[in-house]
Image (tube, grey):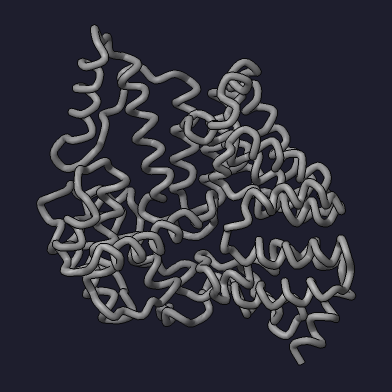
Amino acid sequence: MNKPGRNDPCYCNSGKKYKKCCMDKDNGDNHAEVSVTPEAYLEQQDWGFYAYRTVASLFLKKVKGEYDNKPIMEALALWRRFSADTEPVIRKYGSYAAALEYMIVTMYGHEATQAHVAKKYDVSTATLSRTYQVLYDFALNFEEGSPRAPLAVDPRIGMEQDMRNLERLLGEQQFDSFEEAQAFLDKQINQPGGFRPPAATKVSVKDQAQDLVYKAYEETTAKNRVKLAKQALSLYPNSAEAYLILADEERMLEQSLDYLRRGVDAGEKDLGAAFFKQNKGHFWGLIETRPYMRVKYRLAEILWYSGEAEEASKHLEQMMELSTGDNLGARYLLLPALLSLKKIREASKLLLKYGDDSAANIAYDRFVMEYVNNGFTRRLDELYRAALQINKFVPEYLTGKKKLPQQLPDYVGHGDRNEAIDYAFTHSPLWSRMPELVEWIAKRER
């Protein structure tokens, strides 16, 4: 079989372009192949455009010998996926290369400032900061359990694994003073080749199960992911995230919801009522809470799309109470859920709290709230024009002028078309209840 072009339909009939589906798998983009050196990886990949390969080559040249192969491979794989999916315009090779190195610095605890890294690549700190944020946001938008070939290691999952290993290791030590404990921690973080804590010698059944979950995320087939999730549950029945994996691979809605509800229950049993009470407000900052928070968010998400706005909003409100920083972005689903339920007071409080958020979600939901509360007013017109300033593409998808793609974009940027697609899709249950407002927009855009 001839290999398809990067932009051709994938041969697996997924409906995606080859570059966004099986290309990584065919090119051997798999972190399990630890024998592959960064240099060999650079040569093996189809970079699609010489500028993208040049960025990777410059990055590799600058970091060689300063870090071990694992973080370098992670950064290269991130750049391969990012460049394939977003096809960025390259004006200066050093800007993205510097951002890749700064990803290593921040994820593995190296002592290097933005100014130091920027100077190394001859770019400004402002350019580095901006480009790093783009890459970081892209990495955070990888969907757990996705059926596509994985990133070498999802930066969130890789870092989470390292932190769990470090916590286990600390638990095995006996320190006589805070200074001794700090010295031990500094040694682990600042070791040559980067932060890579050794595995603890004593691993609980619960942690063994979570390790199987992490391994499942790295698998490229649904069959293997399900197998590992079931193994995790056989070891530890309260493995919340194992239920999330089973739910993501389940095709029947009711069964998927059942897995997710069981996952939430398992997480609550695992952590215990006293833990919830003691740590309310800063949940996400504790590594052990993240499996529970992820499965709870997915349950709320599926409930929202299934027309169960009331139940979805309760889960989302609970998440925001548990983690006031809203690290998973629960507010972006909670706001349309509240509006669909016509809970104007609660929606107003949420908008007031996040009024400075520049996302299209907030701007267009503020517009919707005015309509739900007061109908067609002069203020509605003002809010619509303000929303257009945030993202001008949203009306095209709300009115059907542009059709939504079958797959949500992997990466969303402020004001871009991907953000508009994401908004129209995630808010479709809300807008389906407001045909008059859709018609009002359509007339304005003619």
Q: Is residue 374 above or below residue 142?
A: below
Image vertical order of residue 3 relative to residue 179, above or below: below
Quadrant (top left, top right, bottom left, bottom right) of the N terminus: bottom left
Query: In the image, residue 437 lies at what x, y percent?
Result: 85, 74
Left or right position of 186 against 286: left
Q: At 58% from the left edge and 31% from the top edge, which residue is drawn?
A: 281
- Left or right? Give the position of 191 relative to 89: left
Q: Position of residue 42 (x, y in %)?
A: 23, 66
Instruction: Give above or below for 277 relative to 86.
Output: above
Q: Which residue occupies 66% across, 74% down? A: 386
Number of dots carrying numbers? 0
Q: Residue furthest front?
A: 378
Q: Nearer the viewer, residue 220 or 295?
A: 295
Q: Would you identify the image quadrant in which residue 73 lies?
A: bottom left
Q: From where the camera sits, is residue 43 visible?
A: no
Which of the 4 image quadrants contains residue 440?
bottom right
Q: Is residue 399 visible?
A: yes
Q: Position of residue 382 (x, y in %)?
A: 73, 75
Q: Is residue 318 above or below residue 224?
A: above
> Quadrant location of residue 23?
bottom left
Question: Which residue is outermost to the bottom?
Answer: 446
Is 365 in front, or is 284? 365
Q: Residue at x 27, y 9 (%)?
A: 174
Compared across the picture, whether 391 is left or right of 441 comes to left
From the image, which quarter does the C terminus lie in? bottom right
